[in-house]
Image (cartoon, rainbow, N blue to C red):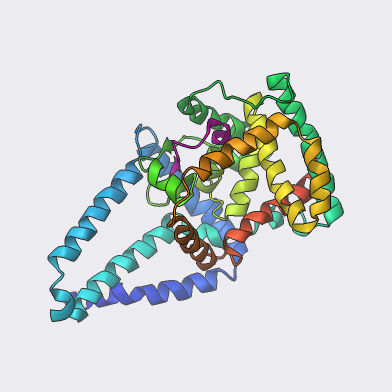
């Protein structure tokens, strides 16, 4: 029996793929049994185990795993030609186990019920509805901006360190949980990534480690982006794997925060998404909207763009292409473009709720 163990594990990945394809057809089942059941236990356990540690355990895990893989490949390099069958079998075992752990610990959330169905709102919207919410967000963003700067031409400077901002993140979710109890965030497991520089060069501002359930934030991004970026990663921790849904929940958590700096970050983040969609649909309307926005807000947008421009490199498009493929492979058929679905959630949610 022992000699069959390795092949069974290796080829079980085929069965896993079939099971996942079947489960993808039953999002209500995934929602109730996994996302609102098994996953809640797994995530809280992970947070209690790793959350209190001040550095990223997941990044250390990836480092050790990377070193081990490179060492294994070097030690077994001759087997590639001498014993190709067993070499491939060992690789398939590792992939199969990793694939199983990835889905069990977090990735089944990709197949849960779409958020607009959970919220009982529509997903589609008209250009008129888009313009309406965009104008509302301009008013809210301008007001939040003036409340801080008292000058419409000055950009907002965060008066907090990045560590302090991360410590404030749960308060937004505590406020949001008054309306949506399942979004309560405790205990916290939110950290700056040890690989912030590589993340920046790859064009990513954060990620969730599915094996330790730690939310990792790029420690180099401007502090203005910290509230929404960290809140986005927390949404992933809470089981919302789809990027568009995490964007929406992250914006909501920031907007509902009692802190005026978080509110500002949330409103302007939501506004930026809507402006981008307006530009795609009607450039004339876009040109009419921009003058309505406080110059200081535009300076914050420019600050972020300048930051990312400073890290552009030839490899970034390849990482984005890989991530686009990853999203499509995990039930986000539009890949990176699915990020725009957040606009549909914003438009339709605030169509029936006060902004």
Q: Give the percent coordinates (x, y) of residue 161.
A: 48, 24
Question: Is residue 67 toward the left or the right of residue 234 in the image?
Answer: left
Give the residue displayed 42% in from the left and 36% down from the top: 191
**Would you say residue 119 is visible in this rendering?**
no
Q: Give the percent coordinates (x, y) of residue 50.
A: 36, 39
For the N terminus, which image quadrant? bottom left
Give the mark count.
Answer: 0
- Above or below — where is 230 with respect to 337? above
Give the residue displayed 57% in from the left and 63% down from the top: 335
Question: Is residue 76 toward the left or the right of residue 39 in the image?
Answer: left
In depth, the one of 157 and 71 nearer the eye is 157
Picture quadrant of residue 124:
bottom right
For the C terminus, which image quadrant? top right
Give the residue displayed 68% in from the left and 24% down from the top: 154
**Would you say residue 291 is visible in this rendering?**
yes
In depth, the one of 175 and 72 nearer the eye is 72
Give the residue displayed 53% in from the left and 73% down from the top: 22
Residue 221, magenta (yes or no): yes
Q: Give the percent coordinates (x, y) of residue 168.
A: 54, 27
Residue farthest toward the right in the current orientation of the protein: 128
The magenta span reads 214-227
Question: Is residue 2 toward the left or the right of residue 153 in the image?
Answer: left
In depth, the one of 238 and 260 nearer the eye is 260
- Above or below — where is 331 with respect to 244? below
In depth, the one of 329 and 159 nearer the eye is 159
Q: Give the percent coordinates (x, y) of residue 141.
A: 74, 33
Residue 125, magenta (yes or no): no
Picture quadrant of residue 227:
top right
């Amino acid at each position: 029996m022992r000699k069959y163990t390795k092949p069974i594990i290796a080829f079980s990945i085929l069965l896993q793929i079939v099971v996942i394809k079947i489960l993808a057809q039953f999002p209500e089942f995934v929602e109730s049994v996994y996302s609102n059941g098994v996953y809640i236990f797994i995530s809280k356990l992970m947070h209690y185990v790793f959350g209190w540690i001040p550095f990223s355990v997941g990044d250390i895990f990836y480092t050790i795993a990377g070193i081990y893989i490179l060492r294994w490949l070097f030690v077994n390099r001759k087997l590639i030609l001498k014993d190709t069958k067993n070499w491939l079998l060992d690789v398939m075992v590792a992939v199969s186990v990793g694939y199983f752990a990835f889905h069990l610990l977090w990735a089944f959330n990709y197949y849960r019920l779409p958020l607009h169905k959970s919220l009982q709102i529509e997903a589609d919207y008209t250009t008129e509805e888009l313009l309406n919410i965009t104008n509302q967000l301009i008013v809210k963003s301008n007001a939040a901006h003036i409340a801080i700067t008292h000058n419409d031409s000055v950009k907002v400077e965060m008066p907090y360190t990045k560590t302090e901002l991360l410590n404030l993140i749960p308060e937004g979710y505590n406020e949001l949980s008054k309306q949506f109890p399942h979004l309560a965030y405790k205990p916290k497991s939110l950290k700056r990534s040890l690989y912030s520089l590589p993340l920046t060069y790859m064009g990513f501002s954060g990620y969730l480690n599915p094996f330790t359930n730690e939310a990792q934030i790029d420690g180099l991004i401007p502090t203005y982006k910290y509230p929404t970026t960290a809140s986005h990663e927390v949404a992933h921790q809470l089981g919302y794997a789809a990027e568009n849904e995490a964007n929406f929940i992250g914006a909501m958590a920031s907007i509902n925060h009692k802190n005026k700096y978080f509110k500002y970050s949330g409103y302007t983040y939501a506004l930026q998404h809507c402006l981008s969609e307006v530009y795609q649909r009607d450039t004339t309307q876009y040109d009419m909207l921009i003058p309505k926005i406080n110059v200081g807000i535009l300076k914050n947008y420019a600050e972020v763009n300048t930051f990312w421009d400073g890290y552009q490199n030839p490899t970034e498009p390849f990482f984005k292409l890989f991530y686009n493929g990853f999203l499509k492979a995990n039930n986000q058929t539009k890949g990176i473009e699915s990020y725009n679905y957040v606009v549909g959630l914003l438009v339709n949610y605030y169509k029936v709720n006060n902004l």
